[in-house]
Amino acid sequence: MENEMTPLPRELTGYLAPDGFLPELTREVGDGVLRLGRLVLCPGPAVDAAWAQNVWHSPRVIAFESIAQAANALKGLGRRWALYDEHLRNRGRAKLIQERLSGPSPKSFRFGTTTPNSPLGSWTLLDDRTLLASARCSSPFAHGDIQFLEDKTGPPSRAYLKLWEVFTLLGQSPKPGQLCLDLGSSPGGWTWVLQKLGARVISVDKAPLAPGLANLEGVDFRVESAFAQRPEKIGPVDWLFSDVICYPHRLLSLVTQWLEAGAAKNYVCTIKFQGETDFETIDRFRAIPNSRLLHLAHNKHELTWVWGKG
């Protein structure tokens, strides 16, 4: 374990960083009072943290004498539990406790089905006689990591998983007949998802779509620059999507233009970082009313910005 045990505040929140992005998370929430691998424990209630893949609300410190006692204590707090153990040098004791608990489903999640409605708690060991447990976490998936049952033949790239994930988390997606603008669409993973949902898609990129996608019903593919698209030229759309590879400040300028025109009802845009993480632009996106910033399990060095009229 990386830290000596110290007295913990009564009110705590745990923030689990995506693998490789602990510095980004601590930039948002601070160093905390204790760090267990990627899990940062901070005093006080939860704050908005884009780089937290899962949030442990009000975790409790529980002393125990036996494996059975530890498992019973967890069962008294909740029905389903996911063990977080990657920071533990010896995981055998924790695994013996987890074996006595109902855990997350081992099956891959099928996109479009209802998300698990039974709460999934998270727990870990502080030492051989003390556990830390949160019965209420922000994600119904273990450690915020959605493992989809993937489509190995339809989409031209794995980028489609980001849209599947954001629609799953939002609990909404484009409806049949709605108009979507997909900027920077090549090779077409997002266009593929939107067309499968029955939406009409204006798909824009200088590079071609994968063979067959441009000819799908409801897809209007335009060989143009994403940044050349103007609200007054396109007209109102129900959804604006962007997975364009560009500097964050350039994406912000594009988004601002469309927001000021009131030309889109919903936005899903990937903020891709070229080199260092651009915290200044992240804060400017965060300041837009009705915004959400997410680090999806299928994001890399990027965030997903979501906006809706609410």
Image: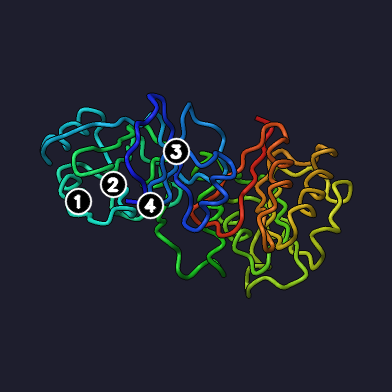
Q: Position of residue 252 (x, y in %)?
A: 77, 48
Amino acid bearing label 1: Lys
Amino acid bearing label 4: Phe
- What residue did someone put label 4 on? 109
Amino acid bearing label 2: Leu
Amino acid bearing label 3: Val
Left or right: 218 as drawn, with respect to 257: left
Along the viewing direction, whichever of 305 and 184 lies nearer the viewer: 305
Residue name at image x 41 percent, y 31 percent:
57
Q: CA distance from mark 3 to mark 4?
A: 21 Å
Left or right: 273 as drawn, with respect to 1: right
Lower position in the chain sequence, tag 3 or tag 4: 3
Q: In this rendering, is residue 49 above or below 17?
A: above
Mark 2 Cα shell of 10 Å, populated few (<14), some (14-19), many (≥20): many
In what element is the residue under mark 1? Answer: helix
Q: CA distance from mark 4 to mark 1?
A: 24 Å
Q: CA distance from mark 2 to mark 3?
A: 14 Å
Q: Nearer the viewer, mark 3 or mark 4?
A: 3
- What residue did someone put label 1 on? 95
In what element is the residue under mark 3? Answer: strand
Q: CA distance from mark 2 to mark 4?
A: 19 Å
- What residue did someone put label 2 on? 83
Lower position in the chain sequence, tag 1 or tag 3: 3
Q: Position of residue 175 (x, y in %)?
A: 60, 43
- What residue did someone put label 3 on? 55
Lower position in the chain sequence, tag 4 or tag 1: 1
Work out which quarter of the rendered image holds the C terminus and state it. top right
Q: Are marks 4 and 1 in contact (CB under 8 Å)?
A: no
Lower position in the chain sequence, tag 2 or tag 4: 2
